[in-house]
Image (cartoon, grey):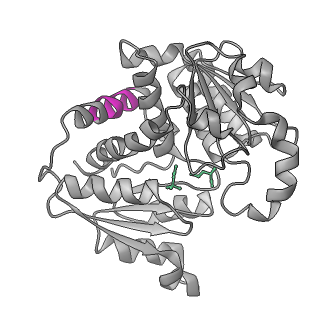
Amino acid sequence: MKKDLLSIADLPEADVYQLLEEARRRKTDRRFTRELEGRTMGMIFQKPSTRTSVSFAVAIAELGGVSLSMNAQDLQMKRGESVSDTARVLSRYVSVIMIRANKHSDVEELARYATVPVINGLTDKEHPCQVLSDLLTAFESLRLAKLKDLKGLRVAYVGDGNNVAQSWMLAAGLLGFQLVISCPEGYDPEKEYVRKASSLCEKSGGQVVFERNPHAAVADASVIYTDVWASMGKEDESAHRKQVFMPYQVNEALLRRARGNAVVMHCLPAHRDEEIAGSVLDGPQSVVFDQAENRLHVQKAVLLNCLK
Ligand code: CP
Ligand code: NVA
């Protein structure tokens, strides 16, 4: 059975801890190795990327493998070649495919037809590799004693109920921590994810709750998380969203309502003084660049998990 990573919920809970442990080891002992020598990762991008693209390319290079970055605009997919044929063809060339796609269903189809592992590098619905690296960052920045202490997290996600929020909901369900989601009306996560998260929570003891008032949402939070108000593909709604979301800005006043030692997270790219005040993004509680760095260490763990 090949090991795809399309959703964080694909991973058994124990595998999440194993991946994070592996990423920690790679971070403390950052070396070039030959573990993935002879392996090639194909990366397909239907949307722009800085962190995902570069961290995956560097990760496989440091493990001795090579990567190939493909802009979907330059592939025959642009002219209508099917996802399934693309999957079958690429599987004859590369050892693993990482894809950033518009539609989550396309990534599922790609994985169905590919005979090599497929990794989700962001879709309209989920961003699993991001949240894995966020969990590592939360663990480190809150100075937790052991990875399992992540179960005691209380995370407040403030802003758009988007792909990142949905992956956080699944993570809370899987690992069993508390997540408060605070979005303006009309911008909640999809019902399908509310259902999935709540069924995971039943097993793990986790909690995903919804709170319209962002000030109430961050009370007692140890992590305050936000993301752009208009995700890639929603740029035409930016002006309207700026008005609707302004009360949800992560700023000094909001931060004062959280625990004094709370950390502020953002997956980046950020729009300073929109979803997050510049002073908070650049302030002492922000761990956003640690999050970005951890993408590299986590990608190594993800690649080794798929390919070894
Ligand atoms: N956070 C993240 O996925 O960044 P990129 O869009 O730059 O890859
Ligand atoms: N929610 C954002 C995340 C970017 C990394 C988007 O989909 O554009």
Residue bounds of the magenta highlight: 14-22
Q: Is residue 81 left or right of residue 145?
A: right
Q: Give 180 or 254, whichever is nearer the viewer.
A: 254
Q: Residue at x 64, y 40 (%)?
A: 278
Q: Which SS does the magenta portion mostly show? A: helix
Q: Is residue 51 left or right of residue 171?
A: left
Q: Is residue 203 visible?
A: yes
Above-or-below relation of 140 to 305: above
Picture coordinates of residue 248 (x, y %)?
79, 35
Q: Is residue 185 left or right of residue 268?
A: right
Q: Is residue 117 visible?
A: no
Residue 158: image quadrant is: top right
Q: Residue at x 44, y 44 (%)?
A: 292
Q: Residue at x 75, y 21 (%)?
A: 217
Above-or-below relation of 204 to 229: above
Q: Is residue 28 left or right of residue 266?
A: left
Picture coordinates of residue 118 (x, y %)?
41, 57
Picture coordinates of residue 157 (x, y %)?
67, 31
Picture coordinates of residue 247 (x, y %)?
84, 35
Q: Residue at x 36, y 15 (%)?
A: 146
Tally the numbered discs: 0
